[in-house]
């Protein structure tokens, strides 16, 4: 399907984002305190036509590159990390579609054009599913019936489509993961509002329940063996992980600025000077790891690139958590109070632990690569 180029020119997306950030920052603590989804911020992003930042210009979007999207997310996270985290989950799916359209001629023009025209929000359940997936797909005439519960679907209160998967026990080839997109308004799909978390409280990362939902054969976008690495996941690793961790880098930069600002209002001591130096050191390590992760996106997707991304992810998470610790140490008791943004940012940064690949899985991948073994157990 061939789509026309955008009929109207849009202002630079950063120029459209920047006027929103002061309001995002002003609302951040209230959203956090109430576990309330950042609906107002999403409405503002929609009005500014920013849900198509990653859509190619040919389809009416801004066509931002991966480094540009990373910067975009870092700046948003400095104002409200929960908004940026939820937005990153939409954006990495759109960036993946754009990459596949440009590099693989994938037939995704219609959804890209719809995102630009309607500013719809895409939802992903991939992080909690990963290689194993979850839920069941039962074969029926013309398709499959899906029963599944998908967790951590960030941004789902504003979502239009969920990109998800379920496992079909194929009698010939064994357990097979089916990938598909489903309208969140469809019969057989409901949202269960369960998100009550330590941090990132305003991301609306609720459960999505698929109960007898029918997926026609033609709506199955991909099939793969359960639990095995697949080209799709090398591509996801290369695009999604650097974008998601851009949010945490932006939050780390924000907590650093808050802590340094507090420290400057007090007389310097040997202890505060040491804490400030340690904070700068850990944040520098996080930036270096993220830069390498982002640089990997210039490589071809595959095991070597995936390993590079997740080595950087492991190093970055350690540095991010250490940055949060050092910021709290430098801020002292004032940072422990909920009046301070440091307390909220400290909690938000803890979520960096939980995205793929977590340490044991990363070490297994890297160990297998180092020893020349198959990356599949």
Image: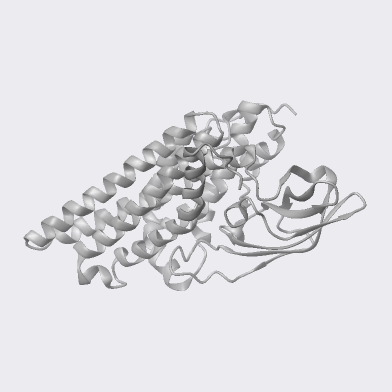
Horizontal arrangement in the rendering, residue 268 relative to residue 219 (left or right): left
Q: What residue do we see at 41% from left, 43% from top?
A: 312
62 shown above or below 351: above
User: Which residue is at the front of the view, 240 or 175?
Assistant: 175
Horizontal arrangement in the rendering, residue 279 relative to residue 182 (left or right): left
Q: Is residue 255 visible?
A: yes
Q: How is the image coloured?
A: one colour
Q: What residue do we see at 17% from left, 51% from top?
A: 277
Q: Is residue 78 visible?
A: no
Q: What residue do we see at 73% from left, 59% from top?
A: 185
Question: How far across and down, in percent of the image, does residue 280 sit?
Answer: 22, 49
Horizontal arrangement in the rendering, residue 285 relative to residue 29 (left or right): left
84 shown above or below 372: below
The total of numbered circles placed on residues is: 0
> In the current view of this chain or complex, which residue is farthest to the right?
141
Question: How far across and down, in percent of the image, does residue 201 sit?
Answer: 47, 66
Quarter of the image where the N terminus is located: top right
In which quadrant of the rendered view does residue 4 lie? top right
16 shown above or below 150: above
In which quadrant of the rendered view does residue 374 lie? top right
Question: How far across and down, in percent of the image, does residue 22 sit?
Answer: 36, 54
């Amino acid at each position: 399907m061939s789509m026309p180029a955008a009929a109207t020119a849009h202002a630079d997306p950063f120029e459209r984002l920047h006027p929103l950030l002061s309001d995002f920052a002003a609302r951040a603590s209230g959203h956090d305190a109430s576990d309330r989804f950042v609906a107002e911020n999403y409405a503002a992003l929609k009005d500014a036509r920013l849900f198509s930042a990653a859509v190619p210009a040919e389809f009416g979007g801004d066509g931002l590159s991966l480094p540009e999207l990373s910067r975009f997310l870092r700046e948003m996270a400095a104002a409200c990390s929960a908004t940026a985290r939820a937005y990153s989950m939409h954006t990495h799916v759109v960036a993946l579609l754009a990459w596949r359209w440009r590099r693989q001629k994938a037939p995704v023009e219609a959804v890209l054009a719809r995102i630009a025209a309607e500013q719809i929000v895409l939802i992903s359940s991939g992080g909690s599913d990963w290689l194993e997936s979850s839920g069941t797909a039962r074969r029926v005439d013309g398709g499959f019936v899906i029963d599944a519960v998908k967790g951590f679907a960030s941004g789902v209160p504003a979502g239009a489509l969920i990109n998800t998967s379920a496992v079909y026990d194929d009698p010939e080839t064994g357990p097979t993961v089916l990938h598909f997109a489903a309208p969140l308004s469809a019969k057989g799909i409901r949202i269960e509002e369960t998100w009550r978390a330590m941090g990132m409280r305003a991301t609306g990362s609720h459960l999505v329940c698929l109960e007898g939902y029918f997926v026609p054969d033609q709506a199955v976008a991909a099939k793969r063996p359960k639990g095995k690495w697949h080209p799709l996941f090398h591509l996801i690793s290369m695009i999604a992980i650097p974008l998601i961790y851009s949010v945490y880098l932006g939050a780390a930069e924000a907590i650093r600025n808050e802590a340094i600002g507090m420290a400057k209002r007090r007389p310097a001591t040997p202890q505060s000077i040491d804490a400030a130096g340690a904070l700068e050191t850990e944040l520098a390590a996080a930036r270096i790891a993220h830069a390498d992760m982002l640089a990997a996106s210039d490589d071809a997707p595959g095991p070597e690139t995936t390993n590079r991304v997740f080595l950087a992810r492991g190093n970055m998470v350690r540095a991010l958590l250490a940055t949060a610790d050092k910021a709290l140490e430098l801020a002292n008791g004032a940072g422990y109070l909920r009046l301070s943004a440091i307390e909220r940012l400290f909690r938000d940064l803890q979520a960096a632990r939980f995205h793929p690949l977590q340490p044991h899985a990363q070490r297994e991948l890297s160990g297998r690569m180092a020893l020349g073994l198959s990356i599949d157990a």
